[in-house]
Image (spheres, helix red, strand yellow):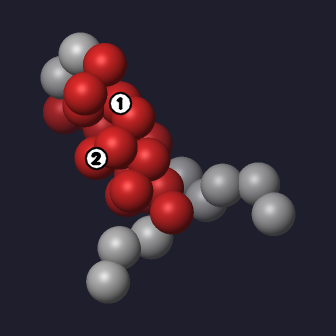
Amino acid sequence: MSTPAQRMVAEQLRPHGVSDERVLEAMASVPREE
């Protein structure tokens, strides 16, 4: 099961050319606003 942040990375960041793994890991692990 993926988290909303992991889905954001897969569906929004990667398709728009963000490829720096450090950025992707940070965006996937930092809690989103509630």
Residue 2: % across, % down: 35, 73
Residue 20: % across, % down: 21, 23
Can you see residue 9? yes
Location of the C terminus by quadrant is bottom right
- Answer few, some or many: residues within 10 Å of disc 2's Cα (few below 14, many 20 plus, some between 14 and 19): some
What residue is drawn where x is 66% and y is 55%? 32
- Picture quadrant where residue 23 is located: top left
Vertical order, 13 against 16 (above or below): below
What residue is drawn where x is 25% and y is 27%? 15
Q: Nearer the viewer, residue 3 or 12?
A: 12
What residue is drawn where x is 28% and y is 47%? 10
> Disc 1 marks which residue?
13
Secondary structure of residue under mark 1: helix
- Picture quadrant where residue 16 is located: top left
Q: Residue furthest bottom?
A: 1
CB-based contact (under 8 Å), mark 2 and mark 1: yes
Q: CA distance from mark 2 to mark 1?
A: 6 Å
Q: Nearer the viewer, residue 5 or 29?
A: 5
- Picture quadrant where residue 29 is located: bottom left
- Mark 2: which amino acid? Ala
> Disc 2 marks which residue?
10
Secondary structure of residue under mark 2: helix
- Mark 1: which amino acid? Leu
